[in-house]
Amino acid sequence: MADVAGKLREVFVEALDLDGEVDVENLKYRDIEAWDSVGHMALVAAIEDEFDVEFDTDQVIDMSSFKVAVDMVTDLQNK
């Protein structure tokens, strides 16, 4: 899971154009301006590309934090 979290952290930083001051591990949807609805869809696409997974609609809606995203990606990779 640590490997997933590390890669996912990089995806969040790149997709949301974050600087070093943002605590990615504790980031939640709409905590920052960049993670709005448009940023969310860009983030979802970037995660799907990086990890070669596909989220269903409910998962896209439920991805409310970095921690939730780590769990979702881990679950999808273990299927």
Image (spheres, helix red, strand yellow):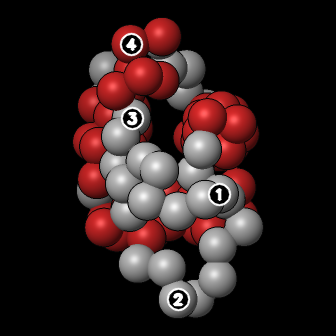
Q: Amino acid at mark 1?
A: Ala
**Going from the N terminus, do you reach mark 2 or mark 1 first?**
2
Residue named by callout 2: 21
Q: Residues within 10 Å of mark 3 (few under 14, many from 20)?
A: some
Tell me how far mark 4 sits from mark 2, CA to CA. 30 Å
Q: Amino acid at mark 3?
A: Met
Tell me how far mark 2 sits from mark 1, CA to CA. 14 Å
The residue depicted at 49 percent of the width and 79 percent of the height is: 22
Can residue 7 be seen?
A: no
Is residue 70 placed above or below 52 in the rendered structure?
Answer: below
Q: Position of residue 21 (x, y in %)?
A: 52, 89
Residue named by callout 4: 58
Q: Amino acid at mark 2?
A: Glu
Tell me how far mark 3 sits from mark 1, CA to CA. 15 Å
**Going from the N terminus, do you reach mark 4 or mark 1 first?**
1
Outermost bottom residue: 21
Residue in the foreground of this view, choosing between 57 and 2: 57
Residue named by callout 1: 34
* Between marks 3 and 1 in the image, the one whose residue lies nearer the viewer: 1
Q: Residues within 10 Å of mark 1 (few under 14, many from 20)?
A: some
Q: Amino acid at mark 4?
A: Asp
Element on which disc 2 rests: loop
Residue named by callout 3: 63
Q: Are marks 4 and 3 in contact (CB under 8 Å)?
A: no
55 left or right, relative to 4: right
